[in-house]
Amino acid sequence: MPGKITLFNLFSKLICLPLLPGLLLVANTLLAAPPTEQPACSHALTLHGKAKYPADFTHLDYVNPQAPKGGSLSQAAQGTFDSFNPFIVQGTAAAGLGNIYDSLTYHTADEPFTEYGLLASCMQLDPAGHWIEFRLRPEARFHDGKPVTAEDVAFTFKLLREQGRPFYRAYYADITGIKVLSPQRVRFELASHQNRELPLIIGQVPILPKHYWQNRDFKQPSLDKPLGSGPYKIAEVDSGRRIVYQKVANYWGENLPINIGRNNIDQLIYDYYRDATVALEAFKAGRLDFRLENIARNWATGYEGPALSSGDLILESISHKNSAGMQGFFFNTRREVFKDPKVRLALTQMFDFEWSNQQLFHGAYTRTLSYFSNSELASSGLPKGKELELLKPFSDQLPDEVFHKEYRLPVTDGSGNIRHQTRKALGLLREAGWKIDGRRLVNDAGEQLRFEILLHDTSFERVVLPWRQNLERIGVRMDVRVVDVTQYLNRLRSFDYDMVISSIGQSLSPGNEQREYFHSEFAHSPNGRNISGIENPVVDALIEQLINAKDRDALITATRALDRVLLWGHYVIPHFHLNEYRVARYKKVKIPEVRPDYGLPTDTWWIE
């Protein structure tokens, strides 16, 4: 999904003034309302610029409005599941649960960050930015026929912030109150008029039925089929192995312009596989219909066979303009072994990306050099101008390198010879108090520098093992532990790891989610997503600057400054990224001709 955080993954403009600075509320007129008048109720909200689609649009540009309906689409999921509740920490939620629910608004895939009414017919934003009001469509219905009301909206936010994942508490921290004004009108009161993205991300939350959940234990995982209002509902379940979603025959929103050409397929099937290699073989055997490939070796050589030769199987690379975010080896700085940034930088020297890219990935990847790679938000060079002004007040709290040295990662010739990097790593480790004792690197107490990397996917072993060999050359011991998905998630939630391979997805409009990623408040918060345990007051301050940026330029400046400080903290060894989706599909799976820049909207596909 494009845009802001996707709520289900392990993982979304004409101008009416005066308005919240930097946030333009779309209306059907170019005339500005006098300050004493109520703002117009508009069909769309956008963070910057103008919305692409006017109030009377008939369908999105990247759909096929004549797409035939019917058929089924099978895809693989990895591991297992034991819950249909994706909103809580406990349990492992089934894939595809987002298909059950509708939200107040819908995030388009051909704009960086614009929300159009879905459950809401329109949105009304206070000119001073103190509240936003959503007006619900009276025809909106849950699957049992009961209407979706403002009470359901208020109940959902209260439930998620009090009993849901810590994410919800962080992401919606600046909502100070929710008022039900009528059965179809709900108002959110906002703590700060400077948090410009908050009115948009409120609309992204799936709305839950109060009458279903109010007498149930929300905190416990369950395989009871939940009630939603979206285009699909759960039809078949083979617990832990398979889940099938069926198109709702009388879906209330079928003919909305935002839904024309979407949700075309009758059945969405997720088959679970413990091993990624087995899933690939199942796809090649025709048991699955499409696959999003993330392994370069598979993409280069893994699909050869009769189906590809005959044209029944189609391989397609679809480019995009999304921020690549950050994937890498994440240090758990809560552990004593990784508290010293010199140790973390030394281990970074020993990862030979160039060799891995040539030998393992067929040269397919680009090295990641930013938490916001592939976007204008990424820092580069030395700080200057407004970014330098923003960082200067923190100069006594930051490494000198932030101001005087460009952040770079070690570069090798790809031969496997990393003598220069090895010498640098050993020098850093000596400065950190480690020394060579025979074939071991030890501290003053004679303890070897040793850590464990926790994996849940065996495909990453081929990335890890060559790095382990390099570490052995300098006396560092790295143990590789592969566990099943459920155990992995449990250990991740309790911060029970030395190092993990993980990723942080980033949108082109970062905001409130940065708190849970990097803020000190979440370094020890149970079940939080501050993977590295970052506790840095400068990072905390820059996150608030980012959230409260008054316009796009200020947002870019604050994001680059945050990126630079995070990079020089050496909290992660960056991996690599690809600026395209690698889609493998059988020819019966059809994709619209127009490919949007900011996502891969599979809900626009159809079956021939």
Image: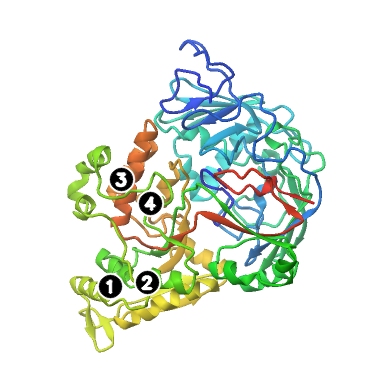
Residue 518's disc number: 4
Residue ID at (49%, 73%): 360
Q: Which of marks 3 and 4 is nearer the N terminus?
A: 4
What's the CA distance linking mark 3 and mark 4? 14 Å
What's the CA distance linking mark 1 and mark 4? 29 Å
Badge 1: how crowded within 10 Å, few (<14), some, or many (20+)?
A: many
Q: Name the residue under label 2.
A: 352
Report the amino acid beneath label 3: Ala
Residue 561's disc number: 3
Residues marked 4 and 2 touching at CB (< 8 Å):
no
Residues marked 1 and 2 touching at CB (< 8 Å):
yes
What's the CA distance linking mark 1 and mark 3? 27 Å
Q: Which of the two discs, 4 and 2, sits closer to the camera? A: 2
Give residue 183's quadrant in the image: top right
Q: Earlier in the sequence, mark 1 or mark 3?
A: 1
Q: Which of the two discs, 3 and 4, sits closer to the camera? A: 3
Q: Name the residue under label 1.
A: 421
> How many labels were placed on the picture?
4
Q: Is mark 2 on a helix, strand or loop?
A: loop
